[in-house]
Image: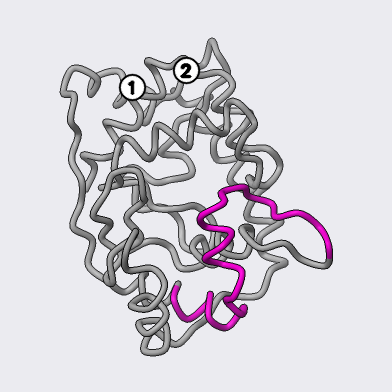
Amino acid sequence: MIRMTALAALLAASFITNAAEEPATKGDPAKGKTVAETICVACHGADGNSPASANPNLAGQVPEYIHKQLSNFKAVDGKPAARNNPIMMGMAAPLSDEDMRNVAAWFSQQKLKPAAAKDESQIALGQKLWRMGDFKKGVPACAGCHGPAGAGLPAQFPRLSGQYPEYTEAQLKAFRQGDRANDPESMMRNVAAKLSDAEIKAVAEYAAGLR
């Protein structure tokens, strides 16, 4: 456990060093509310609590993470978008960087109505992977980057507590398959590649129940 926690800390330190070079994400939540109510409401809710499990809850999410994801859905200087999702690419296209920062600030300040684990049989395995990782497989503890309670790390790692398990599971599988590749230093792709379907589901279920 100690070794895997240390590995997670090392990965986090590497990411933080790179992220520290980026300017802090700041925005005006009042202006962001207008963006949310105009563009985001149908899929994510005006307050960031999504009405459907296929779409992530954004309420209480790390604002820098929201800003990064929105930025990654946009093609820049003739280069393809770093994250591929036709719907989100269309939504992000008309947004300015200021719009993105503003809506990120708005969602981050909203109160999350957390999802819950739906398959209690997965909790034990999910808890083990979250807290300890799997040394034999080279899987670091999820808590090393996302926190013991899944609250994330400001400006670095997203909040996963209370997230829809279906969404978290889908994203981990996308990382594993390489369909999602906007993770710095391939961090999440490297981790997800070592997880089975059962382990991914277990982690997603456990994270949903964290508070």
Asked whether, in this view, residue 46 is left or right of residue 81, the answer is left
Number of callouts: 2
- Could you tell me which secondary element the residue under label 2 belongs to? loop
- Could you tell me which secondary element the residue under label 1 belongs to? helix
Residue 208 at x, y percent in the picture:
26, 40
Give the residue at x 68% y 38%.
Answer: 186
Q: Nearer the viewer, residue 31 or 151?
A: 31
Residue 11 at x, y percent in the picture:
62, 40
- CB of mark 2 within 8 Å of CB of mark 1? yes
The kind of residue tagged 2 is Asp
Mark 2 and mark 1: Cα distance apart in space: 8 Å
Residue 45 at x, y percent in the picture:
28, 65
Task: Identify the residue under disc 1.
Answer: 128
Q: Nearer the viewer, residue 146 or 49?
A: 49
Task: Identify the residue under disc 2.
Answer: 134
Give the residue at x 43% y 17%.
Answer: 197
Circle nearer the N terminus (2, 1): 1
Give the residue at x 39% y 18%.
Answer: 199
Range shown magenta? 78-103
Asked whether, in this view, residue 84 is left or right of residue 103, the answer is right
The kind of residue tagged 1 is Lys
Q: Is residue 32 above or below residue 46?
A: below
Residue 80 at x, y percent in the picture:
76, 54
Q: Residues within 10 Å of mark 1 (few under 14, many from 20)?
A: some
Magenta stretch encompasses residue 45: no
Q: Residues within 10 Å of mark 2 (few under 14, many from 20)?
A: some
